[in-house]
Amino acid sequence: MAHKLTTYLSAEQIAERVAELGREITASYSGGEPLVCICVLKGAFLFYADVIRRIDREIEVDFVRLASYGSGTTRGEDLVFSKDLEIAIEGKDVLVVEDIVDSGHSMDFLLHVLRRRGPKSLKICALIDKHERRERDITVDFAGFKLSDDALVGFLVGYGMDYAERYRELDGLYELSSE
């Protein structure tokens, strides 16, 4: 089946918003301690690379990857780390960088695990915030783009986000549809 890609957000629109996010994140943290920036793999890796370069303060970087096991019939159930943090976050300001937060199940799991490790603060930065689809009480502190259900009819790919491991390399976000 062939796919059709329709531009949803251009590389220029994303770059402009990422620069703004960098300023917002920088302004929200004070103190001399490094900010721990955690990338949620795989989808957030391009966004993460761009946004951390726009944060004007000392940072530490780390990565996590979540995997879902079990029947696959329910979202957010049976989540485990397939890649865990390598640095300690106790007593540190922590920023989780994610590609998209919609139902909130995965982020709820991740935040629960991270809170148990005793960070000083814990915030979320997401490229896409689909708050209307939220099933868990999750707040995105730094949203690249807030999308309502009526603003999007298809599946987004590009800028790290994929469909069956395809289209991650695209510099913008595209709505994927079947031709």
Image: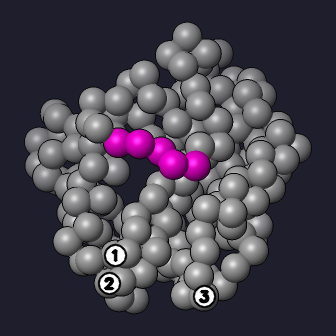
* Mark 1 and mark 2: Cα distance apart in space: 4 Å
The residue lying at 76 percent from left, 33 percent from top is: 9
* Mark 3 and mark 1: Cα distance apart in space: 16 Å
Secondary structure of the residue carrying numbered label 2: loop
3 or 1: tag closer to the N-terminus: 3
* Mark 2 and mark 3: Cα distance apart in space: 16 Å
Q: Position of residue 108 (x, y in %)?
A: 27, 49
Q: Position of residue 160 (x, y in %)?
A: 62, 53
2 or 3: tag closer to the N-terminus: 3
Q: Magenta region's main secondary structure? A: loop
Foreground pick, 53 / 3: 53
Foreground pick, 102 / 42: 102
Tag 1: amino acid: Pro
Residue under circle 3?
32
Location of residue 5 by image quarter: top right
Residue lying farthest top?
150
The residue lying at 76 percent from left, 67 percent from top is: 54
Bounds of the magenta segment: 138-142
Residue 119: mark: 1
Tag 2: amino acid: Glu
Q: On the picture, is 56 further left or further right than 158?
A: right
Location of residue 150 by image quarter: top right
> Where the N terminus falls, by quadrant?
top right
Badges 1 and 2: C-beta atoms under 8 Å apart? yes
Q: On the picture, is 170 further left or further right than 129?
A: right
Residue 38 shows in the view: no
Residue under circle 2?
90
Badges 2 and 3: C-beta atoms under 8 Å apart? no
Q: Is residue 169 above or below residue 102?
A: below
